[in-house]
Image (tube, helix red, strand yellow):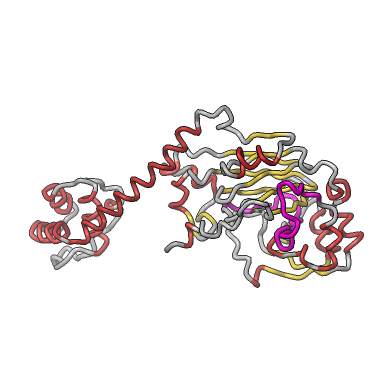
C-alpha cells in the first residue's frame, strides 16, 4: 500500500465515538491505492492500522472496490501513463545528441536550416550575429532613450521586481512614468528594483516610438514585415530584474540590444514541471522545484546573453530571466511560419 499521500492525512473521527464513514480524502486514498494494485485485505489492514474500526474499514473498502468510478480512475491513470511515455521517449533519445547538455551558439545560419533544425524542432539556439549591423545595437542605451524621449510617458510594471514572486500584471501593478524617470531608475547603481518596462506595456505601439522600429533589422527570410505591428515588444529594466519561471505560447526571438541577461531554460518535455503549473507560471521558483524529489533529473540550461545576441526561445519552453546589468531587449514573434500556439495552455486546463 502506498502511504505517500495517505500517511499525511488525519483520521477525522473522535476516538470515543467510532465514525460512521471515511472522509473523502481517505476514500480517495483507498481508490488511488486500489488502482495502484493494492488488494482488499491490504487496504483494510492499512486502514485498521490508521485506527479505523475493522468493520468500517471492510465496508468502505468493499464500497470503493465496487464503485464504477474506480474503473474510470483506472482508465484515466492508464491513459496518462501511456501519454507520459511520449515525452519520456523524446527526453531519452535527446540525450544522444552532442548538444544535449547545452544550448547551441551559432554565428548565423540560413533560414532553411533555422526552420528545420530549431523552429520546427522546438529547440532553442543563441544566434550571436543575427543583430549584426542593427542600428539599435549601436545606438540604444538607457541614456539615449532618455535624451530623445525623456518627456514621453510610458506605462511600466511596478512591484518587487527582483523577487521570484509571481506577478499579476494587473492594473494595480502598472503605473505611468516619464521615460526620463524610468531611465534614472534603470541606471541607478543601487536601491530597490521597482520599475520595469515590459513587452506587455506595449511601448512600441506608441506613435512616439515609431522611429525605434526603424532601428531593428529582422531578416525578411525569417520575419514577415507585414505582421510586425504588435509583434515586436520592448523591455527596459534595471539590473537584477527577475522574471520568474513561466512559458509562452508563441515562439520568440529574444534580441538583447543592450546589457546582459541570464536565462535558465527547461524543455516542455520535462513534464514533471506541469505538476507545479499555475496559469503560465509555476507555483514556486525553479531552484525550489529542483529540490523536490518529483523533479529529480530535470535538465536546466543556463545561458548568458550579451548585447548583440539573440536567443530563439520556442513556445512552451520554461524560462526564468535575470538581468545582470541594466538591459534593453526586443522580443519578436512575427515569424513567417505559424506562430499562434495559444492552444498550449496546460496551466489553464483546470484547477
Ligand atoms: O527579460 C525578461 O525579464 C523576461 C522576458 C520573457 O520572459 C519573455 O519575453 O517571455
Given residues 242 and 74, the one toward you in this image is: 74
In the rendered structure, the answer to whether residue 256 lies left or right of residue 57 reads right
Q: Residue at x 74, y 59 (%)?
A: 226
Q: Is 167 covered by the magenta stretch?
A: no
Q: Position of residue 131 (x, y in %)?
A: 79, 43
Residue farthest along the bottom direction in this orientation: 171
Q: Is 242 covered by the magenta stretch?
A: yes
Q: Residue at x 22, y 61 (%)?
A: 69
Asked if residue 196 can be seen in this view, the reply is no
In the rendered structure, the answer to whether residue 15 lies left or right of residue 303 reads left
Q: Position of residue 54 (x, y in %)?
A: 9, 56
Q: Residue at x 7, y 59 (%)?
A: 55
Q: Position of residue 222 (x, y in %)?
A: 71, 47
What residue range appears in magenta? 217-246
Q: Residue at x 71, y 38 (%)?
A: 110
Q: Position of residue 273 (x, y in %)?
A: 47, 48
Is 56 above or below relative to 40?
below
Is 97 above or below relative to 191?
above
Asked if residue 55 can be seen in this view, the reply is yes
Quadrant of the snapshot with the C terminus? bottom left
In the rendered structure, the answer to whether residue 127 lies left or right of residue 291 reads right
| Count of number-bearing discs | 0
Is 332 above or below relative to 169?
above
Residue farthest along the left direction in this orientation: 55
Is 18 above or below relative to 8?
below
Given residues 306 and 341, the one toward you in this image is: 341
Amino acid at each position: 500500500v502506498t502511504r505517500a499521500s495517505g500517511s499525511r492525512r488525519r483520521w477525522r473521527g473522535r476516538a470515543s465515538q467510532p465514525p460512521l464513514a471515511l472522509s473523502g480524502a481517505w476514500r480517495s486514498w483507498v481508490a488511488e491505492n486500489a488502482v495502484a494494485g493494492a488488494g482488499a485485505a491490504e487496504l483494510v489492514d492499512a486502514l485498521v492500522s490508521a485506527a479505523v474500526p475493522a468493520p468500517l474499514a471492510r465496508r468502505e473498502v468493499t464500497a470503493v472496490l465496487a464503485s464504477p468510478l474506480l474503473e474510470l480512475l483506472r482508465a484515466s491513470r492508464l491513459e496518462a501513463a501511456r501519454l507520459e511515455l511520449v515525452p519520456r521517449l523524446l527526453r531519452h533519445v535527446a540525450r544522444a545528441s552532442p548538444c544535449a547538455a547545452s544550448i547551441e551558439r551559432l554565428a548565423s545560419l540560413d533560414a532553411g536550416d533555422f526552420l528545420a533544425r530549431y523552429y520546427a524542432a522546438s529547440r532553442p539556439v543563441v544566434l550571436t550575429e543575427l543583430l549584426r549591423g542593427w542600428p539599435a545595437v549601436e545606438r540604444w542605451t538607457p541614456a539615449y532613450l532618455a535624451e530623445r524621449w525623456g518627456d514621453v510617458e510610458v506605462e511600466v510594471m511596478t512591484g518587487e521586481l527582483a523577487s521570484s514572486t509571481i506577478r499579476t500584471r494587473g492594473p494595480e501593478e502598472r503605473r505611468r512614468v516619464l521615460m526620463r524617470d524610468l531611465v534614472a531608475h534603470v541606471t541607478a547603481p543601487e536601491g530597490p528594483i521597482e520599475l520595469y518596462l515590459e513587452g506587455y506595456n506595449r511601448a512600441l505601439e506608441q506613435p512616439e516610438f515609431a522611429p525605434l522600429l526603424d532601428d531593428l533589422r529582422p531578416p525578411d527570410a525569417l520575419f514577415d514585415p507585414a505582421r510586425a505591428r504588435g509583434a515586436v515588444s520592448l523591455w527596459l529594466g534595471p539590473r537584477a530584474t527577475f522574471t520568474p519561471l513561466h512559458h509562452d505560447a508563441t515562439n520568440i526571438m529574444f534580441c538583447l540590444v543592450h546589457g546582459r541577461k541570464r536565462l535558465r531554460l527547461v524543455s516542455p518535455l520535462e513534464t514533471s514541471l506541469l505538476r507545479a503549473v499555475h496559469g503560465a507560471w509555476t507555483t514556486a521558483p525553479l531552484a525550489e522545484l529542483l529540490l523536490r524529489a518529483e523533479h529529480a533529473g530535470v535538465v536546466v540550461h543556463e545561458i548568458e546573453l550579451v548585447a548583440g545576441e539573440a536567443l530563439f526561445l520556442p513556445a512552451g519552453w520554461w524560462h526564468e530571466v535575470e538581468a545582470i546589468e541594466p538591459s534593453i531587449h526586443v522580443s519578436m514573434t512575427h515569424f513567417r511560419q505559424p506562430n499562434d500556439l495559444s492552444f498550449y495552455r496546460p496551466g489553464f486546463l483546470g484547477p
